[in-house]
């Protein structure tokens, strides 16, 4: 599939054939291969749809549209197989990778999200040290992206739905609070405003911005690429908790002000 994608000229019939092969093998693939297959299938579907243009996409019988539909179905099959395996016995890093893959490809479903968060809750109790800054940031980004993007077939996904998910969020916040002093620039820049603002409490956000201030995330050359996300987190946090800024110490407040004043390359 990757070879066909690299050419940029793959025939719809060939891609549809490959989609069928991927779907047939979905429950036999290793987790990392499933995630790669999902990403490639979604990318191939997008390429086919872009070839046709917006108006032509309305023709559901076009070979490109039929092939794109088969590729998306194959990706959804991989997601289903992955969710069944990882939610039962995945470690923290693998569950985080699965969530990130589903978030990026739009193949998640509420049941998959619920299963993953239940598994993460179990691991937070039994293996808390597996939740390193990198894993915490990846989980946070994935949940945030799912909140914004949704899942398969436009399904709305909610990380706070149900008692178990609420328990996960409470336990995750506690671990986040403990570990955020160890975050580095890429960990902080890897967060998502749609997770930080609604799901973290004021204490966690204050500590996050204090750590970001220590590292000057987004303001120094080595982390300038994270400026836009830090400004989005800042804006979202202001909307959710407008009075929080008045509780910041002077050091954090100075960083907050500089973050506000610095032009972003993304406008």
Image: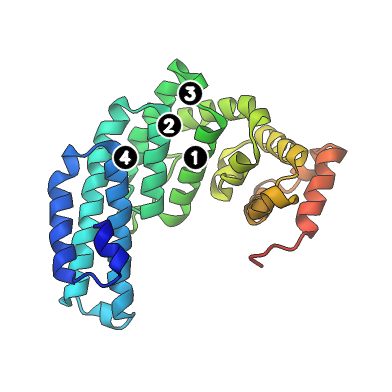
54 to the left or right of 30? right
- Label 4 neighbour load within 10 Å: few <14, some 14-19, many 20+: some
Q: Are marks 1 and 2 in contact (CB under 8 Å)?
A: yes
* Of labels 4 and 2, the one closer to you: 4
Q: Are marks 4 and 2 in contact (CB under 8 Å)?
A: no
Mark closer to the chain start, 4 or 3: 4
- Label 2 neighbour load within 10 Å: few <14, some 14-19, many 20+: some
Task: Label 4: state its secondary structure.
Answer: helix
Q: Name the image quarter holding residue 263.
A: bottom right
Q: Name the image quarter holding residue 173.
A: top right
Label 1 to label 4: alpha-carbon separation: 16 Å
Residue 174 place in picture, x, y as percent: 58, 25
Residue 113 place in picture, x, y as percent: 36, 40
Residue at image coords 31%, 59%? 42
Residue beneath label 2, please? 93
Q: Are marks 2 and 3 in contact (CB under 8 Å)?
A: yes
257 to the left or right of 12? right
């Amino acid at each position: 599939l990757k070879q066909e994608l690299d050419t940029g000229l793959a025939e719809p019939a060939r891609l549809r054939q490959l989609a069928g092969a991927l779907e047939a093998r979905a429950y036999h693939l290793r987790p990392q291969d499933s995630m790669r297959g999902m990403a490639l299938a979604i990318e191939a579907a997008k390429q086919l749809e872009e070839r046709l243009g917006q108006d032509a996409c309305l023709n559901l019988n076009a070979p490109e549209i039929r092939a794109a539909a088969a590729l998306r179905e194959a990706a959804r099959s991989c997601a289903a197989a992955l969710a069944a395996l990882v939610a039962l016995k995945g470690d923290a890093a693998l569950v985080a990778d699965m969530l990130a893959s589903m978030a990026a490809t739009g193949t998640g479903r509420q049941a998959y999200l619920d299963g993953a968060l239940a598994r993460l809750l179990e691991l937070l109790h039994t293996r808390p040290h597996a939740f390193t800054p990198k894993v915490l940031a990846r989980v946070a980004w994935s949940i945030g992206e799912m909140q914004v993007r949704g899942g398969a077939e436009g399904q709305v996904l909610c990380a706070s739905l149900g008692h178990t998910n609420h328990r996960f969020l409470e336990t995750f916040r506690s671990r986040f609070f403990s570990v955020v002093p160890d975050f580095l620039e890429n960990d902080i820049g890897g967060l998502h405003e749609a997770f930080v603002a609604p799901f973290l409490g004021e204490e966690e956000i204050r500590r996050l911005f204090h750590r970001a201030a220590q590292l000057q995330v987004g303001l120094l050359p080595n982390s300038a690429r994270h400026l836009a996300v830090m400004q989005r987190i800042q804006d979202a946090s202001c909307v959710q908790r407008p009075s929080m800024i008045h509780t910041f110490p002077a050091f954090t407040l100075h960083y907050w002000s500089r973050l506000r004043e610095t032009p972003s390359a993304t406008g």
